Image: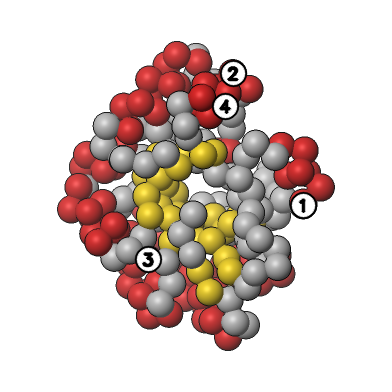
Amino acid sequence: MKIYPDSIPDWFSNLFKSYHWHGDRKKKTVYLTFDDGPTPIVTEFVMQELDKHGFQASFFCIGDQVAKNPEIYDLVQERGHRVGNHTHNHLDAWTSKKDTYLENVSKCSQLVASKLFRPPYGHLTPKVANTLKEKGYKIVLWDVISGDFDRKRSSVSCLKNLKKNTRNGSVVVFHDSDKAFEKLQEILPPYLKFLKKNGWNSEVL
């Protein structure tokens, strides 16, 4: 059973305005984001597909993955995309001690020079969030999630969800990970074509 919502309504995100959920609803722009990389083959596939349509994206990187794949991390930025911090070891703030979690964010920051931050699983605690904001981080969540990581969900269902819920200003979550790659190959190309056909452009966060 799916335990995450396909989209986050504005009434909900308005309750937590200190987080970045979406962009300008009046602007024909979406914000494509990819979590958990950089990953050999997968991240390169993503960039190739983005290039086909002239789209740019924001990649929320795991520090440990950057350490293993520095050349791919560098290539992401050379292609004009933006990077963000996704912790060093994909920690869950709900199950980690505050100091341990913040140290992991700091460890990632030694490799990922960015003040963009997305918490793994979208999980944060008030104390962690407040400390990160004091350190100057912009905490980025989302309003549309692709479901590419969910092995029990079909690609048809994921693509239908994306097309249904994308709006002006949407921050859309994908994953450039080995786990998501099979489904990503099936949903990313037609989704990008859908965006282009319907007049959306993309920007980095």
Which residue position is annotated with label 1? 9
Q: Earlier in the sequence, mark 1 or mark 4?
A: 1
Report, in whole angstroms, how far the alpha carbon at label 1 lies from the one at label 4: 21 Å
Residue 64 can be seen, yes or no: no
Circle nearer the viewer, 1 or 4:
4
**Measured from the top left, where is residue 12 in percent x and y?**
78, 44
Depth check, front residue: 50 or 40:
50
Report, in whole angstroms, how far the alpha carbon at label 3 lies from the one at label 2: 34 Å
Which residue position is annotated with label 2? 127
Q: Amino acid at mark 4?
A: Ala
Residue 190 versus residue 175 in the image, above or below: below
Q: State the residue lying farthest toward the bottom.
A: 197
Residue 128: mark? none
**Measured from the top left, where is residue 72 in percent x and y?**
23, 55
Q: Earlier in the sequence, mark 3 or mark 2?
A: 3
Residue 53 versus residue 103 in the image, above or below: below
Report, in whole angstroms, how far the alpha carbon at label 4 lies from the one at label 3: 30 Å
Q: Amino acid at mark 1?
A: Pro
Q: Earlier in the sequence, mark 2 or mark 1?
A: 1
